[in-house]
Amino acid sequence: MSELIETVVIGGGQAGLAMSYHLRQAGREHIVIERARIAESWRTERWDSLMFQFPNWSIKLPGLAFDHDNPDGFVPKDTVVKFIEDYANLIRAPVRCNVDVLALRHNAATQRFVIDTNDNRLKAMNVVIATGSYHLPVIPEYAASIPREVFQIHTRDYRNPQQLPSEKILIVGSGASGVQIAEELQQSGRSVYLSVGRHDKVPRRYRQKDLYWWLDAMGIWRLPLTQKPELKTWRPLFTGMGGGHDIDLQHFGVNGMVLLGRMKGAVGSKLYFAADLNYNLAMSETWFSTFKTQMDDYANERGVEPPLNPRPAQSVLDSSSGGNQIEILDLNDAGIGSIVWAGGFRYNFDWVELPVFDESGEPKARRGISGFPGLYFLGLRRTFAAGSSLLAGVGDDAAYLAEHITSRS
């Protein structure tokens, strides 16, 4: 049994719902299919204590702003889930839950896409893939050589400190998730080792304005990545925990966390790290200095209030404060019994049987429009701008794709 629909949106999260809003506004027939529940990734692939990283006043989707009484506060992940659920109800999104896509093909004879699911077969003129950016956890192959008695987990499956059976824990990766989990574990009383790669330090607040305000006011969220390609590898660190505060890895080291360089490999209980810790910390400070200058220039041109307490310059950690260049670490000697892999995710589009990906598995598309007529991508990293995958930014790209679909139809 098959069903013919003009446009099928795959993914019932923030991107898919934003797409549904704009398609409805344009009067286009469509459905949204979701493998589980609305906002499933927010429900089951985030740790328990996660707070949304941007202030309440910034939370929005097309046609709806978050209703709050504390604009500068931060909400827990469950509140974000409810906001997305309420949004789906408000816009009357035609969502079909628990529909898993098994294969996506194209029939050249009928010029229709064929979507095989666990429920039935769908045929469509247009397909929008809005499945998010977090598909398969990245865990290096050498992790398999680490002794079995060492507990290993990826950030996707981490929920709280009680999951980890040991007192001493190694976190491999210094992205946003890795450093927030490292901070939580340290505050819970655990001894934490953190493998630090390239990252960018940013201020949670500056001149009485939140980081999100600066990025929005300066146009960084919406600036095409083709105009500012350095944002493609931008790795800002910030958190909404405790009312929102800076993430400073040098302070982590001063407070007792053992900082290591980028992890290179493992053979049994021996782990190997690059001697690049101080370089990575220094580059992070350089980014902060450059970004601060950009904020100051913008503020001086527009009369934004000066900072209350100018931030003092930071010095790179030395060995006395936890920044020593450890290159070989024996898990047994250190007493480390748990490893949290925080190396991010990779895409998994194995079910898409169309020639629209590069050698690395990255979709080949221009602002979400693929080279295969009628096939679109939405809400992925680097779709168009730095804000393309954000809750408050995905609506811009959704509007663009809805206009393209309408003109094509």
Image (cartoon, rainbow, N blue to C red):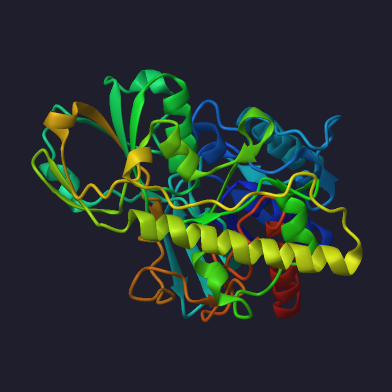
The total number of labels drawn is: 0
In the rendered image of this protein, does residue 208 appear above or below residue 74? below
Q: Say which of 377 and 375 sits in front.
A: 377
Location of residue 228 in the rendering, given as x and y in whole percent from the top left corner: 61, 76
- Residue in the image at 35% along x and 31% along y: 192
In the rendered image of this protein, does residue 241 appear above or below residue 266? above
For residue 51, which quarter of the picture?
top right
Left or right of 113, for residue 319: left
In the rendered image of this protein, does residue 269 appear above or below residue 284? above
The residue sitting at the left extreme is 268
Location of residue 149 in the rendering, given as x and y in whole percent from the top left corner: 14, 27
Q: Say which of 245 and 309 sits in front.
A: 309
- Residue in the image at 47% along x and 44% along y: 249
Location of residue 36 in the rendering, given as x and y in whole percent from the top left corner: 51, 38
The residue sitting at the right extreme is 303
Q: Residue 123, can we see it?
A: no
- Residue in the image at 52% along x and 69% along y: 232
For residue 7, which quarter of the picture?
bottom right
Q: Residue 216, can we see it?
A: yes
Location of residue 15 in the rendering, given as x and y in whole percent from the top left corner: 64, 54
Question: Where is the C terminus found, in terms of image quarters?
Answer: bottom right
